[in-house]
Amino acid sequence: MARHKGRGMAAINYPIGMNLGGDPSQALIHSNPDGKFTVALSAIDLGQGMKQVTRQVAAETLGVPVEDVYVDTADSDTGPHDMGSFASRGTHRMGNAVIAAAREARGVLLEAAAEELEVNAADLVTDGRGNIHVRGAPSRSITVRATAQAAQFRQGKTIAGRGIFLIPLSAVDPETGEMNPNTAFAHACLVADVEVDDETGEVTVLGMTSAYELGRALNPRMVEQQLVGGAWMGQSHVLFETPEPYYPNPDHGPRDFNEYLMPGPGDIAPYSASVLERPAPDGPFGGKGPGEMCANPVLPAVANAVFNAVGVRVDELPITPEKVLRGIRANGGARPQARRGG
Amino acid sequence: MAKVPVQFRLNGSDRAAFIDAADNLLMTLRRGLNEFAPKYGCGQGTCGVCTVLIDGEPQLSCLTLAVACEGRHVETASGMAEGPNLHPLQVAFMDNFAAQCGFCTPGMLMAARALLDRNPKPSREEVIEAIAGNICRCTGYEPIINAILAAAGAGDQKRA
Ligand code: FES
Ligand code: FES
């Protein structure tokens, strides 16, 4: 009876967003009389950081401080249409829609400022700190706030913008079956080290190392946060969780957190993730977004590591002690595979 | 059913409510006293999002009868900041990106505060033990553990 170490690896291509009949997102932006901006989106931030990322994108495009932008994702009744927060599409689709809306709003903002300064709007620039001035002449300036008030109370203008980003439906070529359902792919590679106990069948993840290529990291700390959280989810999916409806008998499915197993804070493995930034040509400021792919490579990498450790190929998740033990027994004992590298 | 009165201190102020005798503290806080920091997760003591301090001890408010809190001091995450000044744990949670959806955060903060109040310099293992009853679906726990260690001034124990 022994504990066997194993190493497994997985590499993935991950499509950002989906394309079942077209994949649109809309955004609306308007200024308030205090010179701050509200972005209305219908997609929901479940904790992925979409509000923060779209806020940065809006502020950067408008040319105003990030503190002066509020993102409202509250209500799909009153907000513009969106397909939703799924398929890792948030940063890419909503970010692009926000850029389009912010460009339009910026155009009106500069026109309103030009009217106040009696100059040509094409000669105006923003300093990102709440001021608009004539290019090369910072003293000929007006604040965004004063501009918003002038537009509202004197000029009768709405400083607002509409944006949509649509990946249209890609038809299937009847001859070849070819289609082009996606424009942005992210990539990752992950190595998992495990230890498998051939007496209990228990798999312990000793550590994971990964590299992610996800366009530009628009908010690097939040990307890291996603990667760390996602790695835990991957570990949970591969070793612990049996989601609906994959029980042998649904009546025996878990009903609460005592029966639905997940790794706790004492079960987490050391994890290091590197981010390779290769700005995507059609991404907002080059971003694609990590999303679901943070969890994905963990599953095949751990499955491969278990095979490497004891020669058991478990092809149904989760990899429970029972499945590992049955596999070891079917093979007539643990069969550690050759190891490459250290 | 006739209502019964209950009085206790909530984050330093005296509060009272008329409740059903069988009401748990969680529902009394949320429905009766508009105190929404403790969350309703499982309602059966398995997730930790309803964690509050009762006389300084971390307790699951979903499993605590409200009438049992008569005359005691109940503390929630809402009471951690002093005016505009956040509690060091709250600052550390922000600095370490220890919340994503934030649903577990009020319970984590309470479990962490109870730990640091009785053990200001916990080891990593002691931190893990203190939050072992609190489920987080988003962060993978690592940032939460790091935040608690950082709040204890033990940033050198941070892993990775
Ligand atoms: S709601 Fe109290 S432990 Fe889950
Ligand atoms: S941050 Fe979402 S559950 Fe912990």
Image (spheres, rainbow, N blue to C red):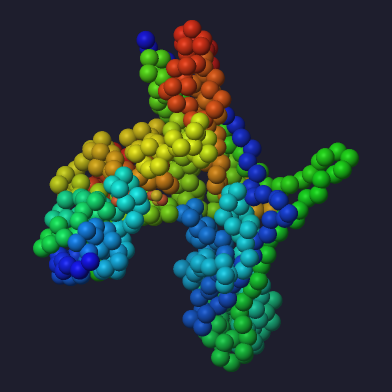
Name which residue lies at 40% across and 25% down: A204
Q: Residue furthest front?
A: B1
For the question of whether residue B86 can be seen, the reply is no
| Side (left or right) of A21 relative to A27 | right
Image coords of residue B35 (percent x, y)? 28, 65
Q: Nearer the viewer, residue A333 or B154?
A: A333
Q: Residue furthest bottom?
A: A154
Q: Nearer the viewer, residue A119 or A277?
A: A277
| Side (left or right) of A111 relative to B154 | right
State the image quarter where residue B33 is shown. Answer: bottom left
For the question of whether residue A205 can be seen, the reply is yes
Image coords of residue A165 (percent x, y)? 68, 61
Name which residue lies at 87% across and 43% down: A174
Q: Residue furthest left?
A: B71
State the image quarter where residue A320 is shown. Answer: top left
Image coords of residue A273 (percent x, y)? 48, 37
